[in-house]
Amino acid sequence: MRYLKQGVIAVGLAALAACGDQTPAENAAENIEAVSENQADTLEQMADNATNEATEQSLENQADATREAGENQAEAVEQKAEADTNGM
């Protein structure tokens, strides 16, 4: 529930910040990255509060993977939009 709340807040803030000259695909990509960053930050906070090193390392790895997945997904959205635009 906490992740969902933070994700919704991040998406809302990103949407407000994106009111400009960006395409819908760029807005979507920014929202994807914002949500994954927020989730990764939460995982890192959990790692800081972990009681043992194995749990801490696992949470840090999950945070890194979450960031990477968000970046990859955002890039894929942008590339698909570009391909769709160029293909028309």
Image: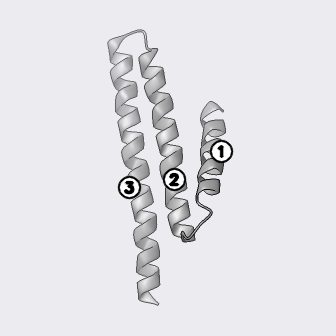
Closer to the camera, 67 or 18? 18
Q: Residue furthest bottom?
A: 88
The residue sitting at 38% across, 18% down in the picture is 55
- x and y percent of residue 17 in the render? 60, 55
| Residue at the image position 50 percent from the left and 56 percent from the top | 30
Residues under labels 3 and 1: Cα distance? 20 Å
> Badge 2 is on which residue?
32
Amino acid at circle 2 = Ile
- Name the residue that disc number 1 marks: 8
Q: Residue at x 63, y 56 (%)?
A: 15
Q: Earlier in the sequence, mark 3 or mark 1?
A: 1
Asked if 30 appears above or below 47 in the picture, the reply is below
> Which residue has dot 3 on it?
72
**Residue type, numbered disc 1:** Val
The quadrant in which residue 23 appears is bottom right
Q: Residues within 10 Å of mark 2 (few under 14, many from 20)?
A: many
Residue found at the very far top of the displayed protein: 51
As drawn, is 40 to the left or to the right of 31?
left
